[in-house]
Image: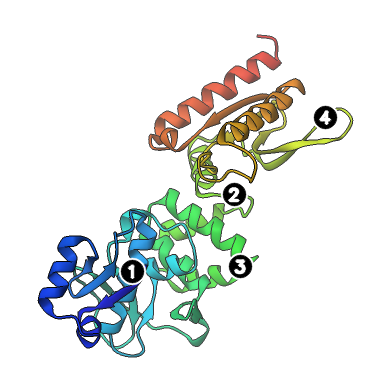
Amino acid sequence: MKTDRFTDLRDAGYQRRTVDKMIKTGELHTVRHGGYGFGEPSAEPRAQHRALIRTTLPLLRDHTILSHVSAGLIWDLPVPYRLLTRVHITRETSNGKVGNWLHSHRLSLGKDEIDVHDGLVVTSLARTVSDLCRLTAPHEALAIMDAGWRKLGSLDAVAECVDQAVGRVGIANAKWALAHADPLSESPGESISRYWMIRAGIPAPVLQFEVRNGSGNLLGRADFDWPDLGLLGEFDGRIKYDELVPDGLTAADVIMSEKHRENQFRNEGYWVFRWGWRDLHDGLAFMSYLEERITKRSQARRGI
């Protein structure tokens, strides 16, 4: 989405009344005070935040570094949508301040904690992971830490940043996420599922388990496996069947393929259960659900 400041529009020959008329007709929409986007606004929160960054950065002085929420978005971390209302920056010379569109943090950054990504000056990926985990709830922090590990290949640099942040607000969340992270959690939904499993004290599952038939042929991968129980778990939130459909197939084809894959798992003696985002919205109920399924499967294996 193309965005402009009012000064840019004025320099391009648009008068104030013309801009107001374009807003009324839908040719322009307001991103923030004095910042506009052409056409209809995106309904996607991440796109909205990128537009907010583009219309805010020109107002800020040099040596401004995108950080926390905004840097997390630029690094493609799973930033919670509820935090995308303000552009986050870090400076060493000004006091921290929270405004309508801007959250300014006063922190000292080392040279290795500053990077350039997508043409923007941002905190390094490791520093961003550490900072963002301190702003979020524990389950969200785990998803961010898992994603950071996948992108970095190691959490050594993140651990250094977390150590440096001892005593700051939210450090307990960052330390907990660091201790429980696993790069095999391939989506935020899988990470948040693991959070509730850990909270419930459920035995740790094997992640991304390869299911094979008696001949050793690969039938597919399951998100979670409890090998002692022959129990597979699938988080059903990664694919929007109506959007991510391979060429030549319909959404119904993809759904049937998933059902066939699951039936193959069952033919090999596995129990399979699924859950989605709606289940994770009530973590306590989800914990009870998991515990019930595991108990029933354990009893069935023992012939009770």
Q: Can residue 168 be spotted in the picture?
A: no
Can you identify the residue that label 1 sits on? Answer: 51
Classify residue 46 as left or right of residue 254.
Answer: left
Instruction: Tell me the kind of residue under disc 1.
Output: Ala
Task: Label 2, secondary structure: give it.
Answer: loop
Q: How far apart are marks 1 and 2 (CA)?
A: 30 Å
Quarter placement of the N terminus: bottom left
Mark 1 surroundings within 10 Å by alpha-carbon count, few (fewer than 14), some (14 through 19), many (20 or more): many
Instruction: Tell me the kind of residue under disc 2.
Output: Ser
Q: How far apart are marks 4 and 2 (CA)?
A: 24 Å
Residue at the extreme left: 17
- Which residue is depicted at the point 49% across and 58% down? 144
Task: Label 4, secondary structure: give it.
Answer: loop
Q: Quadrant of residue 213?
A: top right
Q: Residue 185 carries which label?
A: 2
Q: How far apart are marks 1 and 4 (CA)?
A: 49 Å
Mark 4 or mark 3: which comes first in sequence? Answer: 3
The image shows residue 265 at horizontal and vertical percentages of: 72, 27
Mark 2 or mark 3: which comes first in sequence? Answer: 3
Instruction: Tell me the kind of residue under disc 4.
Output: Asn
Q: Nearer the viewer, mark 1 or mark 2?
A: 1
Q: How far apart are marks 3 and 1 (CA)?
A: 27 Å
Can you identify the residue that label 4 sits on? Answer: 213
Task: Label 1, secondary structure: give it.
Answer: helix
Residue at the extreme bottom: 62
Q: In this view, does 38 lie above or below 274?
A: below
| For the residues bearing labels 4 and 2, Cβ distance under 8 angstroms | no
Can you identify the residue that label 3 sits on? Answer: 152
Mark 4 or mark 2: which comes first in sequence? Answer: 2
| For the residues bearing labels 2 and 3, Cβ distance under 8 angstroms | no
